[in-house]
Image (cartoon, rainbow, N blue to C red):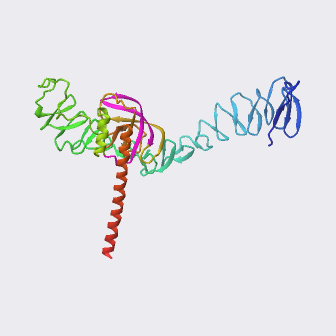
Amino acid sequence: MEGIIVVVFAGQDSSNESTCIGHSIQKYQIKTAICCRHGIEPRYSGDGQEQACCFRSYNTKTERCCDNGPIKFQKHSEQCCGATLYDSKAQGCCGTSSFNISTHTCCASSGNMVAKYTDDKCCGTTTYNSKTKVCCAFENKIEIVNKSEDNHDSCCSSGSMNVTESYSKNTHYCSLGKVISNDIEMCGSFEYKKDSDICCQGVFEKDGKLNGKKCCGVGTFSKATHHCCTHQIYSRKERRRCGKKPSNGLLNRRPRNMKTSTKGVCRICNDSKRFFVKALKSNGFDVCKRQALKVRIISQRRHSGKRRIKMIIQTDLYSEKDYERKKIEVLLPCSCRRIRASKAILITELEDFRETVRLGDSDILLPWYSNVRKHVLRQWKTCKTKKNDLVFFTALGRYLLTSTQI
C-alpha cells in the first residue's frame, strides 16, 4: 500500500485547507475531512461522531483498528488480535491468534501455545515436554536439557552455559555451576567434611580437625602453642589471659608475635597500600588465576559476623572482557570494619555470579591503586610465560618418548 503525505500550504487559508497526496493529489478542508491512506474521508460520521484513520475512516466508539482494517465490536472488552477480535475477559492474544486462558498458556509473544495441566511447558518462547526435559534459564540465555533421571526437576549450569546437567532439588543443590548432594556441606567453594576439615566463617582448612586445630574468628590455631581470646590468636608464651590487661601495661599495643585474625581475602580489612605493594613485589599473592576483575564497591554491611558487599564488575584485567556493569554480591568470611576502598581488584577462579558468592582463602581482594594494578599485571605475564613453558616441555617430553619407542 502506498503511504500518504499531507501538505499544509502557508497563506491566508493555511489553517483551514490542506493537500492530501495519496493515490491522487487532492485539497480538503481540515475542519470537515481527514486524509487517510485511500484518500480523503469525512471527519464526522452520520451521527456526528468524530472519526480517525485506519486504512479508511472509522468510528473509534464502535470499531477497533486491527491489522486489516476497522472491525465493529459488540463489547468494550473486545480487542484486536492480528486481523480479528477477541474477548479479553475470557481469552488471550498469542501472536496473532486468540486462545482460551482457562485451558491454554502463551509462551511470551511468539505465538506458541501450550495446553494447561499437561506435560508440555513453556521455556522462553519455545515449548518442551517436562516429562523428559528441563528448562535452564540464566540471564538472557535459555537452554532445554534432557533429564538424566526421571525425578529431575531443575538444571545446573556454569555462567557460560558450556556445561549443563539436570538434578533433583529434593536430593541435590547447585553451587557455582556444580551439582552437589544435600549430604555434602560446602565451605566457600570447597567440599567440607565435618569429621576431618575445619570451616571458620567460610575459610576452609583441609584436615584441620585431624591436625588438632580449632577455630578462632576466621583463623585456626593449635591449643598446644596458642590460645584464642576475643577472636584473636595469642601465643601461650605471652601468658596473657582473656579480659586481663597485658603485663607490660601498654594497653593499645598488639604483641608482635600475635597472629592476626585476618588472612587471605580478609587482608583488605586492615592492611595498608604499602603492605599490598610490598607483598606483590615479593610474590606474596598468587595472582595466577582465571580472572582479575576490576570492581566498584557500592554498598557493604555486617551480616551474621561476616562482611556482605555489593559490587559492580566493570572489566577483567586479564582478558579485557567488558562485564557491562554487572552487579554481584560477595560475602567475606570476616567481621571487619568498613572497607575504605571504593574500588578493588577481585582475583578469583570463579565464573558463576548468579547468587551470593562466598569468598575464601583461595580468592584475593586488593584495593584499587595504580601501583597495585601494575604489579598484578606484571605477575600475570609471568604466569602466562610459565604456562607456555609447561605446555612446550610437556609436548617435547611426549615427542622424545615417542621417538625412543620407535
The vertical placement of 87 against 243, above or below, is below
Which quadrant, please, contains the N terminus? top right
**Overall secondary structure of the magenta stretch?**
strand
In the picture, the quarter occupied by the C terminus is bottom left
Q: Position of residue 3 (x, y in %)?
A: 79, 40
| Res 219 → quadrant | top left
Q: Nearer the viewer, residue 196 or 292?
A: 292
Q: Residue at x 34, y 69 (%)?
A: 399
Q: Which residues are magenta?
A: 286-315
Q: Position of residue 204 (x, y in %)?
A: 27, 41
* Residue 172 location (% of width, % of height): 36, 44
Answer left or right for 321 relative to 26: left
Residue visible at 13% across and 27% down? 241
**Residue 339 point in image, percent of width and height:** 34, 30
Please name whichever residue, 13 or 228, is drawn nearer the observer in this view of the structure: 13
Residue 321 seen from this side = yes
Seen in the picture, residue 179 relative to 70 is either above or below; the reply is below
Instruction: Compare residues 74 and 140 and report the one nearer the observer.
Output: 140
